[in-house]
Every structure is written in structure tokens, then in C-alpha cells.
């Protein structure tokens, strides 16, 4: 079921819609800063041990940098289909809370919001942002999936990575 939901989240990642808001539950997750990297971030052309993948969305890193904001209580979904920089599972149906919390944290780190869409018919929220370096793009899709929220993150190859 989670794999099916992850597939649906990936398919819907490119779709956005303006919409009504819902209030987060009392046990909403919070986005927290990861521990800072000891090495300085590297541009896409610099040497990194992390691989990259071409997707319909664009070229992405196959993981997130160490300083990408973490989502408290999330666990990796290692069985998620399709390419992504990260696919996480968060307890509760908190798609809007996850999307807006990441938006706030990334804006504080110098990213600019280019779009926040949702909720879609299935409750998915999609966040599109550009980073401080030229060509850096991030897309986050947060989808409620039967008592959980699946978060798919595409972190563009032009973004700095450690």
C-alpha cells in the first residue's frame, strides 16, 4: 500500500492546484535543522561521492545534503519506486504542515518559493523552490497515504551538495 501511495505521490509531484487550507493536527511534525556539514557545500560540477539521476523533472542528486532541513519523526522509505533525492514517511496526515514547514526553513536558508500548490483531490501539497545558486531547484511533494504522509523530495543537481 505504501509503495502504491509513493507511486501516486511521484506521479502527482508535477501537479499543483491552488486550494483551501486545512488545519494541522495537534501532533504535527516539525521541520528541524540537520546538523551542519563539516565540509562546505559543493556546486554541481564539483567532486562528490553522491550520484545523480536524470528524471522527467530534471537532473537530481540521489540524496539530500547533510544540511537539508530534517522532518522530525520521519523515516526513509527505501522501497519507494522511481528516482528521488529522498522519500520519507511521516506519521499522521500532515501534508500541508510538512510542505509549509519545509518552505519556511528553506526560505530561511536563502531559497525562494516559486509555487505552493494544494491540496489536490488526494490531499497532496507540492512545493517548488529555487536555491541561492543559479539553476538550483527543489520540489517537495507531501501526500497523505492512509494515516501517514509520504514526502518525496527532488533536489536539483545544480544545488550545492556535500
Image (cartoon, helix red, strand yellow):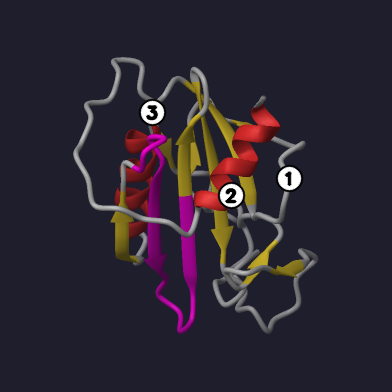
User: Upstream in the sequence, badge 3 or badge 2?
Assistant: 2
Dot in front, 1 or 3: 1
Say which element carries label 3.
Answer: loop
Q: Which residue is mark 3?
A: 94
Q: Nearer the viewer, residue 71 or 122?
A: 122
Q: Which mark is residue 81?
A: 1
Residue 33, magenta (yes or no) = no
Please give the range of residues in magenta.
Answer: 120-140
The picture places residue 136, in percent across and down from the top left corner, at 49, 75
Q: Which residue is mark 2?
A: 10
Label 2: how many Cα within 10 Å (few below 14, some 14–19, many 20+): many
Residue shown at the point (75%, 37%) measured from the top left: 78
**Of label 1 and label 2, which has the lower sequence position?**
2
Q: Is 141 on the left or on the right of 88, as rendered?
A: left
Q: Nearer the viewer, residue 5 or 92?
A: 5
Residue 98, x across and y down, in percent? 39, 37
Amino acid at each position: 500500500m505504501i509503495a502504491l501511495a509513493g507511486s501516486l505521490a511521484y506521479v502527482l509531484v508535477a501537479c499543483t492546484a491552488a486550494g483551501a487550507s486545512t488545519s494541522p493536527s495537534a501532533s504535527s511534525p516539525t521541520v528541524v535543522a540537520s546538523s551542519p556539514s563539516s565540509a562546505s557545500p559543493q556546486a554541481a560540477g564539483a567532486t562528490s561521492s553522491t550520484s545523480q539521476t536524470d528524471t522527467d523533472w530534471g537532473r537530481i542528486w540521489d540524496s539530500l545534503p547533510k544540511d537539508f532541513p530534517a522532518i522530525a519523526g520521519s523515516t526513509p522509505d527505501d522501497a519507494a519506486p522511481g528516482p528521488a533525492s529522498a522519500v520519507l514517511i511521516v506519521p499522521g496526515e500532515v501534508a500541508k504542515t510538512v510542505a509549509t514547514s519545509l518552505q519556511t526553513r528553506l526560505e530561511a536558508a536563502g531559497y525562494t518559493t516559486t509555487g505552493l500548490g494544494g491540496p489536490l483531490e488526494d490531499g497532496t501539497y507540492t512545493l517548488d523552490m529555487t536555491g541561492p545558486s543559479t539553476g538550483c531547484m527543489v520540489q517537495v511533494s507531501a501526500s497523505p497515504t492512509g494515516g501517514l504522509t509520504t514526502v518525496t523530495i527532488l533536489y536539483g543537481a545544480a544545488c550545492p551538495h556535500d
